[in-house]
Amino acid sequence: MKLAGLKSVDNAHDDSVWAATWVPATADRAALLLTGSLDETVRLWGSDELSCVATNAGHCLGVVSVAAHPSGVIAASASLDSFVRVFDVDHNNTIATLEAPPSEVWQMQFDPKVIQK
């Protein structure tokens, strides 16, 4: 995997980026960079050119944590809105929403032993 040199992406998000993680490559696509921002969005970036390939805009407050399953198929985002959203990486579809009020989730991680099918 190549990461677009060491370059910056101006205006990558409309507000501060608070979370980032790598989404592993699959048989059909290269690895992606996943970022979460106070602008309430999660973005997926192609690792070769750092071009935005998808934006997930389902939160009502800033995104403070992101995680990717080791399979590279699903990812999750947690926000100050007390929701965790699990989504399909390749189709950008939300597949589950977990609500945890009145608290926020600040970190999360997938169990590497659980295989996503």
Image (cartoon, helix red, strand yellow):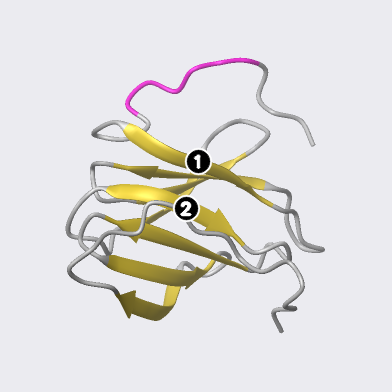
Which percent across, then down, holds residue 46? 60, 42
Q: Residues within 10 Å of mark 1 (few under 14, many from 20)?
A: some
User: Residue at left 68%, top 33%?
Assistant: 48
Secondary structure, magenta segment, majority class: loop
Q: Tell me the SS state at disc 2.
A: strand
User: Residue at left 48%, top 63%?
Assistant: 76
Nearer to us in this view, 75 or 112: 112
Direction from residue 37 to residue 81 in the image, left or right: left
Above-or-below relation of 29 to 116:
above
Q: Which mark is residue 20?
A: 1
Dots 2 and 1: beta carbons under 8 Å? Answer: yes
Q: Which residues are magenta?
A: 6-11
Which percent across, then down, holds residue 80? 23, 54
Which percent across, then down, holds residue 10? 37, 21
Direction from residue 94 to residue 69 in the image, left or right: right
Which of disc 1 and disc 2 is earlier in sequence?
1
Inspect the image, locate mark 1, and give the three-letter code of the amino acid beneath it.
Ala
Inspect the image, locate mark 2, and give the three-letter code of the amino acid beneath it.
Val
Residue pointed to by mark 2 = 66
